[in-house]
Image: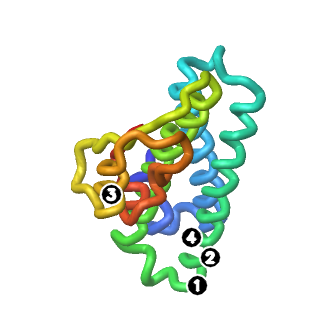
Amino acid sequence: MNLEELAQALKDGKISLTEWQAAMREYLKQQYTVATMLAKGGAENVTPSDWGYMGSLLKKQYGYLDGFAQDIANNPKAWLTGRLDVRMNMYKESAYAAYEDINRREMTNVGMDEERRLLGEADHCPDCLYEFKRGWQPIGTLAAIGDSVCTTNCKCTF
């Protein structure tokens, strides 16, 4: 089931909030698994340490998801609208930020010591423009993809 179908099933009462949350967790796990394999150049290159790192990123998203589910439970009338779809899409987009995070970690692991932000095709927030203008910096000193005003809408890369 894709995110649009999942959102509609919740809105239509075909699944419970608990079922929706479980499906969202599974969706995130699949997306983060793919992001990890892509960043590492294939499943055969992913180490146990990489899986653990991915798990830490995923755990953070699960925390956000738990809060989102609580928001829906507290005020379903406000959320079971198009607003639900917009926020759910942020979780889908978070996998891109995870990919960039894992890729950044991989750059460090192979001995690279500098990075620069490249602007992707998007309307850029002031934070991304600022980070881009900083040019080459030691790895880890630029703001992470997704840690800007544009959050998961960021399409920048390192």
Residue contact between numbered discs 4 and 1, judged by CB atoms under 8 Å:
no
SS type, badge 3: helix
Q: In 3D space, how far apart are the residues under numbered discs 1 and 2 (Cα atoms)?
A: 6 Å
Q: Of marks 1 and 3, which one's residue comes earlier in the chain?
A: 1
Q: Of marks 2 and 3, which one's residue comes earlier in the chain?
A: 2
Residue contact between numbered discs 4 and 2, judged by CB atoms under 8 Å:
yes
SS type, badge 2: helix
* Label 2 packing within 10 angstroms: few (<14), some (14-19), many (20+): few
Q: Residue at x 48, y 54 (%)?
A: 143
Which tag is nearer the camera, tag 3 or tag 4? 3
Residue contact between numbered discs 3 and 4, judged by CB atoms under 8 Å:
no
**Pick the front one: 155 or 137:** 137
Q: Which residue is mark 4?
A: 68
Q: Image height check: is 114 above or below 155?
A: above
Q: Residue at x 50, y 80 (%)?
A: 76
Q: Quadrant of residue 98?
A: top right
Q: Of marks 3 and 4, which one's residue comes earlier in the chain?
A: 4
**Pick the front one: 105 or 45:** 105
Q: Which residue is mark 1?
A: 74
> Which disc number belongs to residue 130?
3
**Amino acid, disc 2:** Gln
Which tag is nearer the camera, tag 4 or tag 1? 4
Q: Residue at x 60, y 31 (%)?
A: 108
Q: Residue at x 75, y 38 (%)?
A: 52
> Which disc number belongs to residue 70?
2
Q: Quadrant of residue 119?
A: top left
Which tag is nearer the camera, tag 1 or tag 3? 3
